[in-house]
Amino acid sequence: NVIRSGEFKGYGETYSRKDLSEETYSNLKELLSDRYELLISYIASQRKLSPDKVKAVFEQRPDYLVTAEYAKQAGLVDVVSGRDEFLKSHSIERKQLLDMQDYTPKPVSVNTRDKIAVCYLQGGITISSVSQYQDGITAAKVQKMVDALNEDSRIKAVVFRVNSPGGSALESEIIYRKLEMLKSKMPVVISMSGTAASGGYYISAPANYIVADPYTVTGSIGVIQLLPDASELSKKAGITNQTIGFGKYAGAMNFMNPPSQDLLASLQRNSENVYSEFKHRVAKYRKVDYDSLENLAGGRVWSAQDALANRLVDKIGTLDTAIKKAAELAKLSAYQTVVLPEKKQYFELFMEQLKNLPTAKAAFTPDSYLDLLAEQFKAIFKPYTALCLMPFELES
């Protein structure tokens, strides 16, 4: 069961349909068309080619993977050469080469006590009860950043780098209020990364200024709720379910029973209320008339260029653009940047995780305690990420 507010809010269609709705299809087609034209234009300008010639490579090349010679003829590369030949032609010896870990940029020395903080908000917006080491954005994590900002009197402005597809509506509202309060103390600028949509846009709305990267996907002002129904599955599996309850909505979230029409109608009203609140938040700070906002909302996703044209963002640029704007709003001519949250070594994170382990170790067998330690590691080390291999082994 998919409950949505906004006819273009297409997230739940993968569960409720066998194909995209006409609204979702047209919205995504327009978004991808904007991105495609932006990509063509960028390559053309960088390679000094006409847009038509670049488009021909995308749409008329004979093979999926092109050869180096084809790339040269098309103007995509300048020279076809092996790596050793390339190094030799530029008089680069191997002893002159640096590994990435050996390269340290020269620190910038600025004679000022003023700072601009850059805070990273990355991932889905989830409830704060989730472990602080899990991926995602929570109000608790944001509060830690806000506390750090308030404790350092030298921080005069803050840039939040947002990369989020959204998530919990309630958590988004809590974060929204925290940024709204912070704005009364210092300029708040949003720098949108790849995605700042739905809840990602919700938490961005109260900022003094919003900068979107050229390839940002934003908007998606709408609400979606998914209500699983496993009643047919339970019948096929031969599982029976009995519920004893008192009250109209007792047992409402028992997925072994189909939801009642009263429950679905109630959730739809709840969805409409949240949607209305979302639009009021956007209208308040983006200076868009509430009644006309429906043309920008409805769950539509926008390219950065369309978002700018529709006043959902203030400028297209990079993180540096946002930092410079924050300095301008704070009236700073000289400043240094600090990044929050501060990075911690894996060992620090692991030791902090150990504090959460039960103190009565005698209640555990050696094997079960090792399993518990392994769970702590899993909370820090994510699968499918690059890790370093230690030059030794640990034996239990």
Image: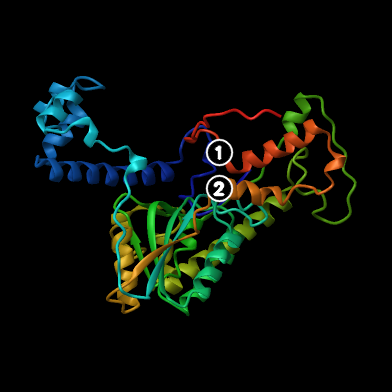
Residue at image point 38% right, 71% down: 115
What colour-coding does the image apply?
Answer: rainbow
C-alpha distance separating marks 2 and 1: 9 Å
Say which quarter of the image contains residue 28. Answer: top left
Tag 2 residue: 135
Could you tell me which secondary element the residue under label 1 belongs to? loop
Q: Which amino acid type is marked by label 1?
A: Lys
- Above or below, 269 against 257 in this view is below
Residue at image point 72% right, 35% down: 230
Q: Which amino acid type is marked by label 2?
A: Asp
Circles 2 and 1: CB distance less than 8 Å?
A: yes
Tag 1 residue: 382
Q: Is residue 115 left or right of residue 75?
A: right
How crowded pointer 1 is (Cα within 10 Å; few <14, some 14-19, many 20+) is rated as few
Visible in this render: residue 128?
yes
Can you give x and y, in whole percent of width and height, for residue 199 in the image?
Answer: 51, 57
Q: Is residue 145 left or right of residue 95?
A: right
Say which quarter of the image contains residue 273. Answer: bottom right
